[in-house]
Image (tube, grey):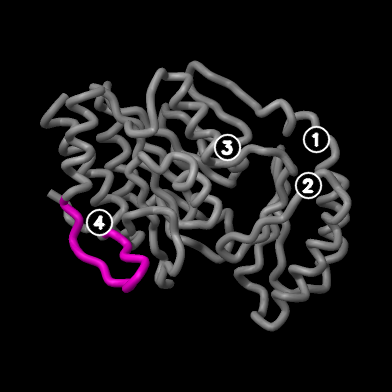
Amino acid sequence: MATALMPVNRSSGECSAAPDVWDRICSVLVRYKRLFVFADFDGTLSPLVDIPGDATVDPDAEEALRRLCARPRISVAVISGRSVDDVATRVGLPITFAGDHGLEIHAPDLEFVVPEAELLRRKLPELCNRIREKIRQTPGALIEAKRLTASVHFRQVPGDLVPELAGIVQSCVAGTAFEVRRGNCVFEVRPRINWSKGDAVKWLLGRNGAVAEQAVCIGDDDTDEDMFRQVPEAVNVRVCNGDVVSTTAAPYFIPRTDVSRLLNGVADIAEAIC
């Protein structure tokens, strides 16, 4: 069975094997007979890429997701900053998708949009156009306009220009009903409302009569920390993409290349118990 998981020791920075996580998952399935897996897309199920449109699911992770989908007592949701349609097309499985950082949720039997975000949707194109015009002279900067949010990507922007780009984006957003959060080489422009990936996880659990203890949350970015903070009773796993994670609310971390091992480990347990 996979043993890639390692607990983060916040005081020393040291890490060690964490077989206890498998015991926790076993106990949840024995007690509740159902488990919910919530995974980020970019940097978690997919390697990070320079051009957002080039992202694809890691083949090993895709196969692990298919194994999980085949288990009736395992529910899988992908929670992404991408739009629902975008991430659903890239994953291509009949599961739950929460796009725009959880503001919009689609499943085979469900369509939900956070009402406050829907009310602000019509104001987003004008803001995106303003940002697009202001960043035209910044080499490598790219704005991605989505239905409820927008992303200003700067993975290809020279490092010395990033602070200036941050100031431009902040100045465009200032005084609007939106806010800016920084992620992995991206500035996320989101409605200034009280909703995050963590709220989406809690909403989906509540809709299914489940509790936080039944969740496994996996993500690599600061926006995924919202999941870890809001459902601390879950098995929360921070994914590392080369850089050392200095601060996280997750008690476990793995390199991105081991995400498929984690998912397959969950599938192994489910096949043995359920």
From mark 3 to mark 2, how far is it between C-alphas? Answer: 16 Å
Q: Residues within 10 Å of mark 3 (few under 14, many from 20)?
A: many
Q: Is residue 18 magenta?
A: yes
**Helix, strand or loop for the magenta stretch, by majority:** loop
From mark 4 to mark 2, how far is it between C-alphas? Answer: 37 Å
Q: Residues within 10 Å of mark 4 (few under 14, many from 20)?
A: many
Q: Are marks 2 and 1 in contact (CB under 8 Å)?
A: yes
Task: Farthest residue to the front: give it.
Answer: 11
- Residue 120 - label: 1
Dividing the image into 4 quarters, which one contains the C terminus?
top left
- Identify the magenta region: 7-19
Count the numbered circles shown: 4
Residue under label 3, please give it. Answer: 102
Label 1: element kind: helix
Q: For residue 253, what is the image quadrant?
A: bottom left
Left or right for 171, reference 102: right
The disc, 3 or 4, on the residue closer to the chain's N-terminal end is 4
Q: Residues within 10 Å of mark 1 (few under 14, many from 20)?
A: some
